[in-house]
């Protein structure tokens, strides 16, 4: 009996382990692969593990080039064989046996084409040597090293993903603050009212919640393109530029807040329902008006609900693709439509790895969010469900 | 709560919903029937005489003259147009599945209804599984499960898509390894069938964690007395699950169904990530194409498609709405 039970329990743990792998492994795989050369990550799975092409291309088994291209950081360039050869000729036999140089030297003496990785390793070695003291090399070498360093500083083709990160930050934070303010007030009133119209507001909100976002966007596009607004200046500083309403950050924020409202008021309402009505009645008896009672008596016990609802508002804005990709101009665009933009572009110059790096960068904040707020997320997911 | 106070409290929320959901919906309905006056097409003949031969050549070119004026009523032009209901093509005997709207509708319904049972069953299985494990391992399992559900759909589907590469990608190799008895090379990207299956797989992977977490929370409140009573009566594990646990979880199952059907019906991101528009279109991607991808925005067609989509969502939701309304009439509270 006991051995039977133990076997059952072992199977249960095995199945649970299998589920964890199915759920989480694809993310681990992508994070690992984002530090590889593209033919490793997009090639056979064994290559993503071994990183053989990454070695050939970079001389190391990991590279952050994908991130460098995505965020427009300086990218290390590969010196040509012609650039490198004169220096190789000048090195002593001792130096030629150094592990960073030997592969390159062997390749040249066997008259085979050295790999990019071997060339990179050599230039890295040269730079690290030069940093130790100028007296070790001639003027010529020093100049080559400076040139290499300068080339490093020049961007190859940055994707400027950092800008999208900042845009996302602005959009999501604005959406969270505004939706919570509106949603808390509305949710409170809906929880406390027994009137028929309160019920109808909730039912209509439920119908709105079901509308595919793209159908709403098709209602926005034409009016937004058609509406011209004039320039607004405060102290000579252009606050709002002239043009159509389309493409602006605040347009996307307002639309996301609106799309968020049905869900927010439903959720806030279910949290307010759990707070006994006697609490606000006692506040009213003590001479507060509704707003004062709401602020001084109800809100202090509502923070868990506000945080949970805020998390879901955050996720809606952060994860949105439909609204942001349709309504934001190229320069105001957020991370998710930007990543989608990477996919369509020509697949060259490590652009694919920039997309992978961008994907990992967009996932990282969510990872941290789940770690910190796991309890609130679970309670939020089940809060709506408890009522059925 | 006095009516006036109520009004002030709900005003910001209701105003945003009216302005940015209700009015756009009205506009969608309007745009399905009305559009700007069609630009007048003029043929311009440009002639030139060759200086040496004296030969005169003329080329015709078209110019479009924008017409100012009120929008024109288009009747069923948009709704019956080729990209939407395709009334004319259908009456001429075109095959239903060759028309974009019906193909998109078929995929959307397929995606919604094929993923649903898998999500419910998988969610129930994982929830009862985790409920039988030591408390200390449950936290990490829930953490891992939250990942596919919380991570941005576009990103999550990309992560899966990148594993399906035909040149030895992990999922591709796994599927071909599991189907070792056939010599056929199963590409996960080439055929429409494979792409549909992959998209559905993504859908299940993405939403099953949600079902799991909701059901797991429900399992915590199952009455132990009932379980023990069933055990005394000699009920097997399966019978206890079937007759005690599932009825207890029934309201939660309805809840997950409702949320999932709403979300599945608007499926868009995985198709963009999988770059599968040529093999799978959903109603949302169809509208997205008319509105965002096309240089010349097809507002009328997009609006007509949106209108039909909204009607269908409403029909799908109707049973739930009717039930909620009955509950409300029963005890006056939701």
Image (cartoon, coloured by chain):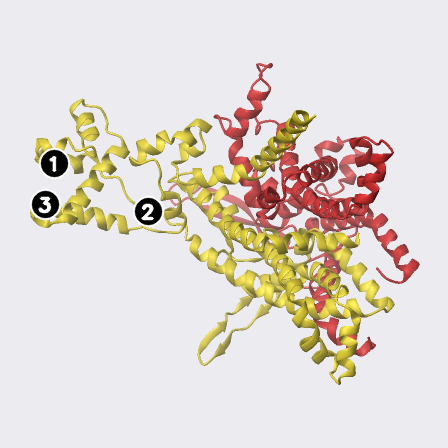
Chain colours: A yellow, B red
Circle 2 packing at 10 Å, graded few (<14), some (14-19), many (20+), is some
**Horizontal relation, residue B101 to residue A363: left or right:** right
Q: Are marks 3 and 2 in contact (CB under 8 Å)?
A: no
- Residue at which label 3 appears: A140
**Disc 1 on helix, strand or loop?**
helix
* Coordinates of residue B261 in the picture (x, y in percent): 74, 45
Between discs 2 and 1, the one toward the N terminus: 1
**Horizontal relation, residue B127 to residue A251: left or right:** right
**Horizontal relation, residue A75 to residue A376: left or right:** left
Circle 1 packing at 10 Å, graded few (<14), some (14-19), many (20+), is few
Marks 1/3: CA–CA distance? 10 Å
Residue under the image location 75 percent in, 84 percent down? A286
- Quarter of the N terminus of chain B within the rendering: bottom right
Q: Chain of mark 1?
A: A
For the question of whether residue A285 can be seen, the reply is: yes
Q: Are marks 1 and 3 in contact (CB under 8 Å)?
A: yes
**Disc 2 on helix, strand or loop?**
loop
* Coordinates of residue B277 in the picture (x, y in percent): 61, 38
**Disc 3 on helix, strand or loop?**
helix
Q: Chain of mark 2?
A: A
Between discs 1 and 3, the one toward the N terminus: 1
Circle 3 packing at 10 Å, graded few (<14), some (14-19), many (20+), is few
Marks 3/2: CA–CA distance? 25 Å
- Residue at which label 2 appears: A156
Marks 2/1: CA–CA distance? 26 Å
């Amino acid at each position: 009996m006991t051995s039977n039970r133990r076997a059952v329990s072992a199977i249960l743990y095995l199945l649970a382990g299998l589920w964890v792998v199915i759920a989480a492994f694809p993310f681990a795989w992508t994070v690992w692969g984002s530090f590889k050369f593209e033919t490793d990550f997009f090639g056979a799975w064994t290559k993503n593990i071994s990183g053989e092409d990454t070695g050939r291309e970079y001389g190391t088994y990991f590279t952050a080039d994908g991130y460098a291209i995505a965020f427009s950081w300086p990218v290390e360039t590969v010196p040509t064989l012609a650039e490198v050869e004169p220096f190789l000729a000048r090195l002593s036999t001792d130096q030629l046996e150094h592990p960073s140089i030997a592969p390159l030297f062997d390749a040249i003496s066997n008259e085979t084409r050295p790999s990019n990785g071997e060339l990179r390793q050599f230039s890295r070695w040269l730079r690290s040597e030069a940093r130790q003291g100028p007296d070790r090399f001639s003027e010529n070498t020093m100049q080559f090293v400076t040139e290499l360093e300068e080339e490093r500083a020049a961007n190859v083709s940055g994707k400027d993903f950092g800008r999208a990160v900042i845009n996302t930050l602005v959009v999501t934070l604005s959406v969270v603050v505004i939706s919570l303010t509106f949603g808390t007030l509305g949710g409170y009133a809906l929880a406390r009212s027994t009137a028929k119209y309160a019920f109808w507001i909730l039912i209509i909100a439920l119908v709105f919640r079901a509308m595919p976002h793209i159908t709403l966007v098709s209602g926005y596009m034409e009016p937004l393109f058609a509406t011209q607004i004039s320039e607004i200046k405060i102290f000579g500083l252009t606050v709002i530029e002239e043009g159509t309403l389309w493409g602006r950050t605040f347009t996307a924020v307002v639309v996301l807040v609106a799309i968020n409202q049905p869900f927010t008021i439903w959720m806030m309402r279910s949290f307010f329902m759990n707070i006994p009505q006697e609490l606000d009645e006692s506040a009213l008896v003590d001479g507060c008006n509704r707003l004062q009672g709401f602020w001084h008596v109800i809100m202090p016990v509502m923070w868990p609900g506000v945080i949970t609802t805020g998390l879901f508002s955050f996720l809606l804005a952060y994860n949105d693709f439909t609204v942001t990709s349709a309504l934001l101009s190229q320069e105001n665009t957020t991370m998710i439509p930007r990543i989608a933009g990477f996919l369509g572009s020509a697949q060259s110059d490590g652009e694919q790895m920039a997309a992978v790096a961008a994907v990992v960068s967009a996932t990282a904040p969510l990872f941290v969010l789940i770690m910190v707020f796991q309890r609130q997320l679970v309670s939020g997911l089940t809060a709506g469900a408890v009522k059925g | 709560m006095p009516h006036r106070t109520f009004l002030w409290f709900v005003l910001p929320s209701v105003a945003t919903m009216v302005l940015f959901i209700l009015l756009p919906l009205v506009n969608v309905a309007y745009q399905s029937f009305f559009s700007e006056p069609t630009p007048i097409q003029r043929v311009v003949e440009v002639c030139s005489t060759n200086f040496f031969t004296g030969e005169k050549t003329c080329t015709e070119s078209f110019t479009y003259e924008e017409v100012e004026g009120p929008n024109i009523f288009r009747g069923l032009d948009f709704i019956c147009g080729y990209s939407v209901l395709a009334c004319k093509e259908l009456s001429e005997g075109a095959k239903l599945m060759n028309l974009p709207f019906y193909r998109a509708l078929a995929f959307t319904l397929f995606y919604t209804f094929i993923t649903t049972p898998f999500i419910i069953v998988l969610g129930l299985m994982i929830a009862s599984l985790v409920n039988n494990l030591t408390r200390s391992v449950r936290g990490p399992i829930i953490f891992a499960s939250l990942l596919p559900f919380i991570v941005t759909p576009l990103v999550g589907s990309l992560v899966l898509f990148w594993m399906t590469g035909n040149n030895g990608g992990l999922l591709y190799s796994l599927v071909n390894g599991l189907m070792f008895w056939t010599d056929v090379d199963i590409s996960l990207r080439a055929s429409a069938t494979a792409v549909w299956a992959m998209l559905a797989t993504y859908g299940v992977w993405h939403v099953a964690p949600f079902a799991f977490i909701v059901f797991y929370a429900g399992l915590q409140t199952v009455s132990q007395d009932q379980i023990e009573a069933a055990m005394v009566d000699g009920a097997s594990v399966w019978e206890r699950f079937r007759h005690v646990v599932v009825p207890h979880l029934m309201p939660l199952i309805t809840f997950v169904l409702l949320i999932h059907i709403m979300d599945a019906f608007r499926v868009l991101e995985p198709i963009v990530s999988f770059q599968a528009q040529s093999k799978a279109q959903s109603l949302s991607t169809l509208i997205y194409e008319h509105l965002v991808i096309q240089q010349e925005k097809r507002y009328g067609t997009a609006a007509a498609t949106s209108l039909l989509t909204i009607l269908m969502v409403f029909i799908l939701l109707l049973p739930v709405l009717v039930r909620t309304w009955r509950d409300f009439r029963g005890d006056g509270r939701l």
